[in-house]
Amino acid sequence: MSKQTAHTHGDPCFDGRMARFGGDLHAALTALYGKRTDFADWHQRLIDLVWRAYDARPQHLKALDEARAAADTPWYQDAKMLGYMCYPDRFAGDFGGVKQKIPYLQELGVTYLHLLSVLKARKGDSDGGFAIADYLSTNDNLGSIDDLEGLISDLRDAGISLCLDFVFNHTAREHEWAQRAIAGEKAFQDFYFMYPDRTVPDQVEPLLDEVFPQTAPGNFTYVEDAEKWVWTTFYPYQWDLNYHNPAVLLAMLDNLFQLANRGVEIFRLDAAIYVWKQLGTHCRNLPETHVLIQLFRAAVSIVAPGVALKAEAMAGARHITKYFGHADQAGKECQLAYHNAAMAALWDSLATGSAKPAYDMLSALPEKPEGTSWVYYARCHDDIGWAALRDTKGAEWGASDEHLNWLWRFYAGEVDGSFARGRRFQPVPGEAFAGSNGTLASLAGLEAALEAGDDIALDLAVRRILLLHAVPMALDGIPLIYMGDELALLNDYGHADSPAHQDGRWLHRPVMPDGLEGFTPVHQSAYARVRAGLRSLIKARKHLPLLGAMNSSRYLDAGNDHVLAFVRPAKDEVMLCLANFSASEQSVDAGVIEEVLGAGARDISPLNGICGRRLNELGPYQCRWILGEKTE
Ligand code: GLC
């Protein structure tokens, strides 16, 4: 394809999309780089890149794009959506092993699979695969990129979309760009933030986050080979990319398109909040970060509209909705976003037995824009970051540092009466709290109950685990299951035996067992209950189209602080979810149910085994789903 100067391609589909999204693309590029004298040249290069990527997109993926674009509602908003995330090596060995596990995923109901640590990472410690040395090849132990492409196609045939991490804030020091920067090539030194001495780092450092204060203190690393200080927000081997340089933007977009054209359907925009740096600021959630994501989205809308972007924005609650785009850009950034604030709030509610932390925050958050979906989860490969609950500027809710310190100690099992067996993660010196590590089952009390041989505690732990599955299943987004949580796996205390697994988050990254042979009989019975409950929840959700993410959840004050109440409205029907976060029986005023659902309300709780008697009564940690007619 020869270089085109006019922005029409002659392909009606491409030209149509260009007419629709080319303006957004141009506006974002102008906002970021418009002051450059060579702006027109960069604009042309961007158009050429977008054009080439579209041209190279295989026909079957173009067909998928068209089918998705023609659908009434976005594919990722469907109630049938269910996510699962895992490390392929820990889940099934390699890509071939994952392929063999497709029936397992199908049986669970999975429709999107997030594989962690796939793209070629640096050797040795790689922050769990988040230090990428080459975006266009895969880790040797898993198989080749062609094998990955084959797996993607098998997954798609089985109705499962593949999601990969797009680690776009930084590359590994071993990436060719960084290596060439070390070798002294100016063009590649400009891909990163490199300083001859500590003058700039010393000015900026006090304003910045410390992400791993214990294992990677500071945000700058001295690189002897280059005789320069390099910006490294995460580990010293993760070099932050410099998006002030449009060459970086184009190179990363090119990587994204090449992966999309291999069939990746969801890209998780890793560490999105840090992506744009501005000296003199705290370099988090900056307006330019949003513009950059708008640019990625516009480009994806032109090349591969069947692809979705998912924000991993570990920010305070008031920030995360903005990663869908806000104000006049609403709906123009990521289609999906992790709801990390809801996740942390649910754990807060579980520890305190009060639904208030979750209610106060969720009811105060702005609605997600049309055409978007949250991703709700109880656990993932990272720690539970409590800071999401502290960011309360302008909000009427929020947790004090004292309370967050209590939660932090609670989930490390250090508070009297705590059911949890987790560990604290990486506090900044002088800070009252940081994150908590541990598997869902260990944090929810199963490990302690098994150790104590206490049947009552075991029953409560299973109920807590199911509650943290049941609430996300009913909310306005895609529920995401983290590998092993479906088996109620416990913490992996042996993780530090491996030099590459020193980081405390490996506590909750256990290897999937082949079967349950190693489990004690009691653990097996707990697992059987979790499994049965989870299957019922998934099955029920898939049969309730109103649980799709088209309509936002509406939160109600149920008049009982232990009970989180929210409504999922559809055209004619409404579902009310009542979730009891306490270990004792609770009830809500029957009038609340009647007001929302009319007189004919009926219980459709998938977890009937643990139900109270009347509709308004809830057993310990019970989550009730009630369906009725729309009364408003
Ligand atoms: C994301 C990942 C986390 C990683 C970090 C740096 O937050 O989830 O595991 O450490 O990015 O890439």
Image (cartoon, rainbow, N blue to C red):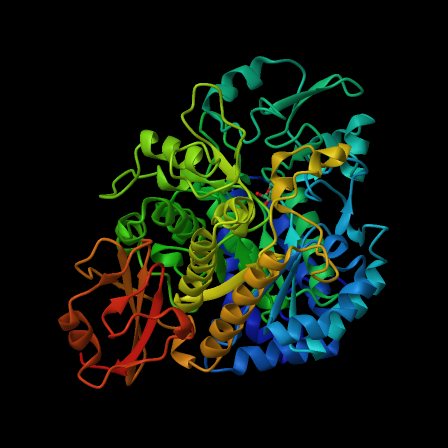
Residue at the outermost left position:
591
Looking at the image, is 253 positioned above or below residue 567? above
User: Of residues 339 and 614, which is closer to you in this image?
Assistant: 614
Residue 191 seen anywhere in this rendered image of the structure:
yes
- Quadrant of the displayed image that contains ligand 1: top right
Looking at the image, is 510 positioned above or below residue 463? above
Identify the residue at horizontal 82%, vertical 55% (top origin).
142
Identify the residue at horizontal 54%, vertical 15% (top origin).
202
In the figure, is residue 512 to the left or right of 527?
right
In the figure, is residue 529 to the left or right of 583?
right
**Image quadrant in which you'd find residue 225:** top right
User: Of residues 202 and 541, which is closer to you in this image?
Assistant: 541
Residue 57 seen anywhere in this rendered image of the structure:
no
Percent from the top left, x then y, of residue 137? Answer: 81, 53
In the figure, is residue 441 to the left or right of 315?
right
**Image quadrant in which you'd find residue 242:** top right
In the figure, is residue 86 to the left or right of 563?
right
Percent from the top left, x then y, of residue 344? Answer: 42, 46
Looking at the image, is 562 positioned above or below residue 14? above
